[in-house]
Image (cartoon, grey):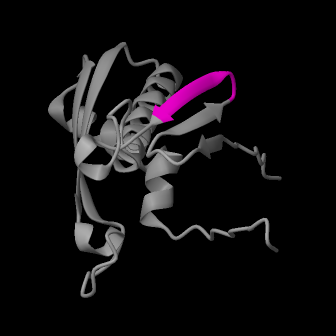
Amino acid sequence: MASIKTVSVVGVQDASARMDVTAGRHRIVIDQPPSGGGQDEGPSPLEFFQAALAGCIGAIARLAARQQRIPFRGIEVRVEGRIDADGLLGRPGAARVGFESFDLTVKLDADLTPEQKRAFVDEVERRCPVSENIENPTPIRVICDAD
């Protein structure tokens, strides 16, 4: 039987570009740079999305290392995503609105051979829910207060 957990956040935005998000007991600010009409008080939504991917890879790496009894000293995850900005700006001809691809560069600080590191990082990526949601379509249902 599946162990389903509901995870939710609430974002509130006024007329500015700043979105104040409550996630559990945490407050997160998502904003735009001045070139996008914001005050640059936090990462943009696209940067935040990439940060979630990096954070998930790190969390799963720590969990998997503990499960496999691997001495884990740390991890660095660099996420680079390519996106056609024309789509989000509403310009015609964009291939798609979302990221076209991501490159993750992972530097693992653990006593493993290069082959063991590669196998470990591959396993971590397979177990990362954020990565899995990027690779596989997840239905989104938008409920509007007008419904």
Q: Residue furthest bottom?
A: 93
**Is any part of residue 84 visible from this angle?**
no
Q: Quadrant of the C terminus?
A: bottom right
**Quarter of the view holding residue 89:** bottom left
Residue in the image at 42% along x and 30% along y: 61
Given residues 27 and 101, the one toward you in this image is 27
**Residue 139, how many percent across, how many down?**
62, 71
Q: Nearer the viewer, residue 1 or 130?
A: 130
Horizontal side of residue 5 vs 32, given as left or right = right
Q: Main secondary structure of the magenta part?
A: strand
Q: Range of the magenta residues?
A: 24-29
Q: x, y (%) of residue 124? A: 41, 40
Q: Residue furthest left?
A: 114
Looking at the picture, does residue 56 appear above or below residue 63? below
Residue at 36% x, 50% y is 46
Q: How many marks?
A: 0
75 relative to 140, above or below: above
Query: Residue at point 79% right, 72% down?
Result: 146
Tell me which corner region of the image, top left, top right, bottom left or bottom right, holds residue 13. top right
